[in-house]
Image (spheres, helix red, strand yellow):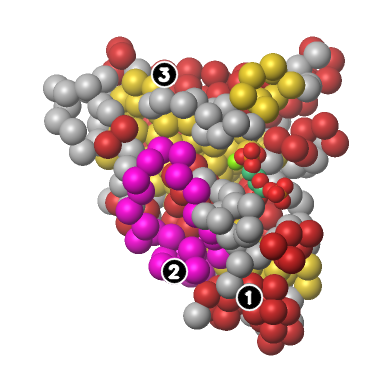
Amino acid sequence: MSDTLNRISEEGANGSSMMPVIQGVGRAAIEIAALLRGAVFRGALGLAGGENVQGEQQQKLDVLSDEIFLDQMRSTGHVCAVGSEEQEELLVIDEYASAPYLVLVDPLDGSSNLDVDGPVGTIFSVVKRKSASDQRPDVNDTLQAGRDVIAAGYVLYGPATMLVCSVGSGVNGYTYNTNNARFEISHPDIKIPQSGGYYSVNEANSAQWLHGMADTLISVRHTEKLGMRYVGAMVADIHRTLLKGGVFLYPADAKNTTGKLRLLYEAIPMGFLMEQAGGKAHTGEQPVLDVQPEALHQRVPVYLGSCAAVDGLTA
Ligand code: AHM
Ligand code: MG
């Protein structure tokens, strides 16, 4: 396993240009993993006292992870702005306001798992700015459909720290080796299994799901012979779905009529990875990557996984 994150530079058209950004994500991941490991000793668990734009209570680790990620994106010199789930407005990096890329991030996804030492993750995607380099980037630069994303991925903080990403030519998984402080390739060319695996959903909401989804799921889980797993942290649930097959879903329900998960920070990056791994990503109405974003913090229903399972739930 000697191949490291540097191999991104050899992958397809976007490989070399994405190198600095993906390496920046890798540095952020190492810092966030260390922060998580030591959080209980530094009093960094628990609520920060504020709310994010979605009206959700922020945990201290949400805020700290957001700062780490932003600092690392700034240090690449290639990122002009960052849109974060934890920030109401787009954050423009003034020193590099003419740089070519914008990054969208959920710095610490699945934060309800923090108090129970469960897995959490970071989710990101990269787009090219639409505005001219002599203009100040703004939110319109981020409102790009998933088809225009040039790189996306996630970091899973589990027993090992893994970075799984795509620059548009397949999906590779790298595991952080603490002995040499490098991300080494451990899961080359990930392809989602097209049969078997698990369905993954918060089934406690099934009575509230719209459009008869509860009955549809019962039928699909029988036809596709799916087991059931749910961590409640999207990164962990998607990681298992990519490796073992099946489907992760967060449907619209009576409370969240447009779904719970965020289009730009969660649905599009994971949808990009799913398609790159030979799977599908759908909202129930259209492929996730075809949705034209209208707002930074927009939500959509998601069905992500093996083709037959996603088709069965969304046809
Ligand atoms: P977060 O970004 O505030 O952590 O919320 C997103 C998380 C996902 O990781 C996970 O799939 C989902 O919310 C779980 O929601 P629920 O607790 O409703 O099952
Ligand atoms: Mg999230």
Numbered disc in front, either 1 or 2: 1
Whole-angstrom CA distance, mark 3 to mark 2, is 39 Å
Residue linked to disc 2? 285
Mark 3 or mark 2, which has the lower sequence index? 3
Residue linked to disc 1? 212
Image side of residue 75 versus residue 111, left or right: left
Q: Nearer the viewer, residue 184 or 158?
A: 158
Residue 31: where, in percent of width, then height? 62, 23
Q: Residue at 65%, 65% (x, y): give it.
A: 209
Number of callouts in the render? Answer: 3
Q: Is residue 63 magenta?
A: no
**Label 3 sits on what residue type?**
Ser
Quarter of the figure with residue 75:
top left
Report the magenta residues as a range: 274-303
Instruction: Residue at the far front: name it.
Output: 254
Q: Residues within 10 Å of mark 2 (few under 14, many from 20)?
A: few
Residue 28: where, in percent of width, then height? 55, 26
